[in-house]
Image (cartoon, rainbow, N blue to C red):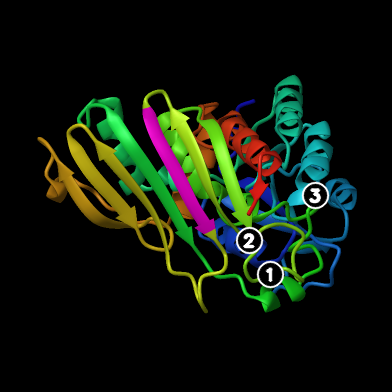
C-alpha cells in the first residue's frame, strides 16, 4: 500500500509515559496529524482538535480514514490491539516489545501482509549514528573478527515505579525487565551481529521481591558465529540509572559506547578509522524514526523498524526467560 497523502492521520492507543512521547513527536512532524487518542482512563489534552475514545472500534467508527495507529499501551495488550487494527486493514506502529511471544509476532506479520498494510515497531536505537557507525565497521570489515561483545545495563526502577501502576511488574502485562527496560539493547546486538545463540541466563531478584513477579537482575551469555558475548542487566542500581554500554573487542579495534541510552562514545581505537570521522545525531531518534515511517508509507519502502526485524529479539528474550536459572 502506497499512501500519496501529504498529511497522514494518526491515532495513539494508550496515553501514558510512552504515549506522550509519541504525541510530542507526531506534533513535530509536518507529514503527520494526530486526530485521536484511545485510553480506558480519563485523559485530558490541551489540543481540542484531538478526539478521545475508550475503544479502538469507537475510534475507527468516527475516523475510518486514519492512516497509522500507534500502540503505546501495556506490553501484554499489544498483540490483541495490533490484531484488531490490522483486521481493519490499517497501518500500525507498536511500541517495544511488539509482543511477548515470537509466534504472536509472526501472526501479526502474516496478517499485515494478508491485508496489504505495514506493521512497524519502535526500535529507535537503529537510528543512532554511533550504533550505525559500528554496524558499518563490521559490515565493511574494518574490525576484522569480532572476538568479544559485552552489554551492561545498570538502571534503577524503585518500588514506587511499580506500585503506582497496576500493570507494571506483572508477568502478563509487563513481561519482565528484558522486555520493558532492556529490549532496545538486545535489539542492538541483533542489529549488529544477526541472530544470537543463547547459552545461559543466571537471574535473581535483589530489591523487588515483594513488588514484581519476575527477577530484576541477571547475566546472559550468548554467541554469534565465533563471537562470544554476555549481558549484565539490573534495575537495582542505587537511586538512579547509571549506564547502558556496549563494548566490542575485535581483531583490529576496540570500541565502547556508553551513556544511559548508548549515546556517548567512551573509547574508540580502530585501525584505519580515526574517531573524529564519526557523525553524531543532531535530531532525536524518535524524530528520525517517524521520518522513516512516513517515507516508508508514502513510497512503499522497507524500513529498519519493520516488524520482521523484531522477531529475533522477541525469540531471544522469550528463550532467556524460559532458560532462567535462579541463583
Q: Secondary structure at mark 3?
A: helix
Residue 208: mark in rendering: 1
- Which stretch appears magenta? 227-233
Residue 155 vs 176, above or below: the answer is below
Give the class, few, some or many, for how many residues have Cα within 10 Å of label 3's Cα (few <14, many ≥20).
some
Q: CA distance from mark 2 to mark 3?
A: 22 Å
Q: From the viewer's side, name the closer residue of 182 and 281.
A: 182
- In percent of the image, x 54 and y 34: which residue is there? 199
| The magenta stretch spans residue 7 | no
Dividing the picture into quarters, in which one does residue 14 lie? bottom right
| Left or right of 69, for residue 129 | left
Magenta span dominant secondary structure: strand
Q: Secondary structure at mark 2?
A: loop
Q: From where the camera sits, is residue 222 visible? A: yes
Provide residue 203's location: percent of width, then percent of height: 61, 53
Provide residue 177's location: percent of width, then percent of height: 63, 56
Q: Name the outermost residue toward the top.
A: 114
Q: CA distance from mark 2 to mark 1?
A: 7 Å
Provide residue 188's location: percent of width, then percent of height: 45, 42
Q: Name the outermost residue toward the front.
A: 327
- In percent of the image, x 81 and y 68: which residue is there? 166
Question: Residue at label 2?
Answer: 216
Question: Residue at label 3?
Answer: 77
Amino acid at each position: 500500500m502506497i499512501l500519496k497523502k501529504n498529511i497522514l492521520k494518526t491515532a495513539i492507543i494508550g496515553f501514558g509515559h510512552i504515549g506522550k512521547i509519541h504525541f510530542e513527536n507526531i506534533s513535530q512532524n509536518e507529514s503527520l496529524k494526530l486526530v485521536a487518542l484511545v485510553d480506558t482512563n480519563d485523559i485530558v489534552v490541551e489540543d481540542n482538535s484531538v478526539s478521545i475514545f475508550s475503544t479502538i472500534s469507537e475510534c475507527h467508527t468516527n475516523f475510518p480514514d486514519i492512516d497509522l495507529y500507534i500502540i503505546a499501551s501495556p506490553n501484554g495488550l499489544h498483540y490483541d490491539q495490533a490484531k484488531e487494527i490490522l483486521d481493519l486493514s490499517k497501518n500500525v506502529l507498536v511500541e517495544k516489545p511488539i509482543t511477548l511471544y515470537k509466534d504472536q509476532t509472526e501472526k501479526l506479520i502474516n496478517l499485515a501482509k494478508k491485508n496489504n498494510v505495514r506493521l512497524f515497531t519502535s526500535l529507535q536505537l537503529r537510528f543512532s549514528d554511533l550504533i550505525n557507525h559500528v554496524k558499518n565497521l563490521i559490515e565493511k570489515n574494518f574490525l576484522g573478527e569480532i572476538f568479544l561483545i559485552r552489554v551492561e545495563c545498570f538502571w534503577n526502577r524503585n518500588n514506587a515505579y511499580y506500585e503506582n501502576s497496576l500493570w507494571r511488574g506483572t508477568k502478563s502485562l509487563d513481561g519482565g525487565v528484558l522486555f520493558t527496560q532492556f529490549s532496545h539493547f538486545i535489539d542492538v546486538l541483533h542489529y549488529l551481529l544477526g541472530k544470537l545463540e543463547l547459552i545461559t541466563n543466571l537471574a535473581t531478584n535483589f530489591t523487588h521481591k515483594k513488588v514484581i513477579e519476575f527477577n530484576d537482575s541477571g547475566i546472559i551469555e550468548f554467541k554469534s558465529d565465533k563471537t562470544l558475548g554476555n549481558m549484565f542487566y539490573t534495575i537495582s542500581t542505587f537511586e538512579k540509572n547509571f549506564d547502558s554500554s556496549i563494548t566490542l573487542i575485535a581483531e583490529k579495534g576496540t570500541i565502547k559506547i556508553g551513556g544511559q541510552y548508548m549515546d556517548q562514545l567512551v573509547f574508540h581505537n580502530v585501525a584505519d578509522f580515526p574517531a573524529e570521522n564519526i557523525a553524531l545525531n543532531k535530531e532525536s531518534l524518535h524524530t528520525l524514526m517517524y521520518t522513516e515511517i512516513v517515507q516508508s508509507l508514502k513510497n512503499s519502502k522497507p524500513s529498519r523498524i519493520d516488524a520482521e526485524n523484531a522477531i529475533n529479539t522477541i525469540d531471544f528474550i522469550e528463550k532467556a526467560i524460559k532458560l532462567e536459572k535462579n541463583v
